[in-house]
Image: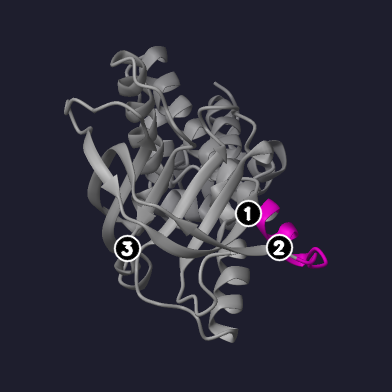
Amino acid sequence: MAPALTVGDFSRITHLSVKTLRHYHQVGLLEPATVNPDTGYRYYSGDQVPAAQVIRRLRNLEMPVAEVKAVLNAPDAQARNALIAAHLDRLEAELAQTRAAVDSLRNLLRPADAVAIEHRSVPATPAAGISAVVQHADVLAWWQGALGELHATVRAQGLRATGPGGGLYASELFQYGAGEATVFIPVEEAVRAIGRVEPVLVPPAELAIITHHGPLADDDLSYGELGSYVTAHEISIDGPMREYYLCGLADTPDHAKWRTEIGWPIFRADGPS
C-alpha cells in the first residue's frame, strides 16, 4: 500500500499551495484520501497526483470549479474533451474581444490626424433593403447577416447595384440602446420582395460626411470627430445617421482595409455645393 502524503508533501509534488488544497477540499473538488479524526490532518495518496495536475492546468485556464468537477466526473473521454473544447472556445472568443479592445485603445492613443469632413447633398435613392428594430449590442451581428442576405438577393434577382451598400440608423439606437435600422443596396431595377428583403426608397438628405478607416468596432472614434464638428458649427439636425460601405465585408475579410463613410444629417445654409 502506497504511503500517505502529508498536505505539505502533496503541495510540493503538485505545485498547489496548502491554501489552495484546503479550498479544493472545502468545495469538494479534490478531497484528501484520509483525514485524521483526532488531529484533523489531511493526507493524500499518490494516485491523486494526476487529478491534481489536471485541476491545476484547467484552473490556470480560468475554468470555473463547477466545470472542472464536470470534467473530472465525465463518463468518458469524449464527454471530457467536449467540456474542455467548449471552454477553450470561450477563451478564444474572449481573447479576440480583448485584442479588438486593445487595437481600439491604441487607435485612440495615436496622435490625431487632420480629418476631412465634407458636406454632401444625397438624392432619394431606390434600393433593396432590410429593416428591423435592433438592440445596440446586436447591431454588428445583425448588420453582417442583413448585408449578406441583401448581396445574395441582388445577385439572385440579377439586379445592378448603382452604388455602395449603406445603412440608416435611428437616433434611438444610440440614445436608448434600441432603434430602427435599415441596411440597403441601391439598385437600378425593381426589387421583388423575398424573405426580409423588400424595395425601399432611401430618403434624400443633407449630410456632413467623414470617412472611417478600419473595423466598425471602433467607428465611435470617427462618430466622435464628426459629432464634434457638426455641434461646434451648430448645424446638426434630427434624423437617422447614415453609413456607406465603400469597402467592407463583401469586398475583403481584412478589417484594416475597410472604408466606411459616416453621414450626419445637417442644416445647410449655403445650399448644395
Q: CA distance from mark 2 to mark 1?
A: 8 Å
State which mark lies toward you, 2 or 3.
Answer: 2
Residue 11 located left or right of residue 162: right
Does 232 appear above or below 94?
A: below
Can residue 39 be seen at all in this image of the molecule?
A: no
Q: Position of residue 144 (x, y in %)?
A: 41, 37
In which image quadrant can residue 5 be found?
Answer: top right
- Quadrant of the drawing holding the N terminus: top right
Which kind of residue does numbered mark 2 sit on?
Ala
Q: Which residue is mark 1?
A: 211
- Please report the bounds of the magenta region as a residue range: 103-114
**Cα distance, mark 2 to mark 3?**
24 Å
The residue lying toward the viewer, choosing from 125 and 172, is 125
Residue that carries the numbered disc 3 in the rendered image: 170
Which numbered disc flags the more N-terminal residue, 3 or 1? 3
Is residue 82 or residue 237 the one in the foreground?
237
Snapshot quadrant of residue 149: top left
Label 1 amino acid? Answer: Thr
Marks 2,1: beta carbons within 8 A: yes
Q: Label 3: how many residues lie within 10 Å, few (<14), some (14-19) or many (20+)?
A: some
Magenta span contains residue 77: no
**Residue 110 lies in the magenta stretch:** yes
Q: In terms of secondary structure, where does tag 2 sit?
A: loop
Percent x, y for residue 49? 59, 30
The residue drawn where x is 36% and y is 54% is 168
Count of numbered circles in the view: 3
Identify the secondary structure beneath mark 3: loop
Which badge, 2 or 1, is on the more N-terminal residue? 2
- Residue 220 spot, x, y in % from top left: 55, 63
| Residue at which label 2 appears | 116
Residue nearest the observer in this picture, 115 or 266? 266
